[in-house]
Amino acid sequence: MRDHRYARLVLVWVALYLCGNAQQRHLAEYQARVEFGSPAAASVSVSVRTSAAGGSGRLLLAPQADQTIEGITVTDEGGRPVAAEARWEDGVVRIEGIVPEAFSVRYRVTASRTLHRIPLPAPSVAALPQQRPVSIAVVLPRGHVAVANSFPGLQWRDAEHGSAQLAAVPSVIVLRVAPREAVTPADRLLTPETLSTTAMLALLLLGSIFWIARNRRRAG
């Protein structure tokens, strides 16, 4: 009898656990498109879909000190405005009150000089493990190219169109854009990746020289 009661309690606990997990929302799809109008300004459009009604609840947008965010709009799948509130707080834009299962956020970001870091709205819900529901597309101004490496790493279809498929939403895209004719060989070579590779090879070379010198001293 005691074993039967224990088994029933376990079944009830498992049922409650599964129901609770079924009601938890997760990020089902996140599509961001960043279109540069110039090296100092870009329009951002983000489409978000969650696994259940209730939306993401909150989005956080963290621009840099020299950046301006303008024209924030939130709409549902039908293009109808969503009663969401966007407010600045401690240098961060908080977009709250989003309840549809699928919605879109649009805004424009400008920098005082060159736009190197494009902030993306980070949702309060995460994707499921082993999924890659986040896609990012970047469109550069005509006649411009991406210089050096970007974060996250982008695959370039041509000089002006890049994309990435990710497992999580990055809060920012780091990308240096310059006119094609202004890019020098040094700009392409002096990247964080090449610098780190050069430093690693230099350390290996110094280590080899030290090892050879020490062996020669011992042999002498």
Image (cartoon, helix red, strand yellow):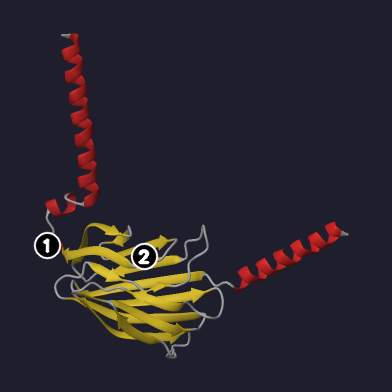
Please report the residue visible at 27 percent of the width from the left and 74 percent of the height from the top: 63
- The percent position of residue 176, horizontal first and vertical second, equals 21, 63
- Which quadrant of the figure has residue 86? bottom left
* Amino acid at the residue labelled 2: Pro
Residue that numbered label 2 is attached to: 170
The C terminus, quarter of image: top left
Looking at the rendering, which quadrant does residue 144 occupy?
A: bottom left
Question: In front here: 219 or 6?
Answer: 6
Residue at label 1?
181
* Figure check: 199 above or below 193: above
* Disc 1 versus disc 2: nearer the observer: 2
Give the vertical position of 131 relative to 106 (above or below): above
Q: Secondary structure at mark 2?
A: loop
Estimate the x, y position of residue 1 in percent, counting from the top left. Answer: 88, 59
Number of labels in the image equals: 2
Instruction: Check disc 1 and report its element: helix, strand or loop.
Output: helix
Which residue occupies the foreground of this view, 142 or 196?
Answer: 196
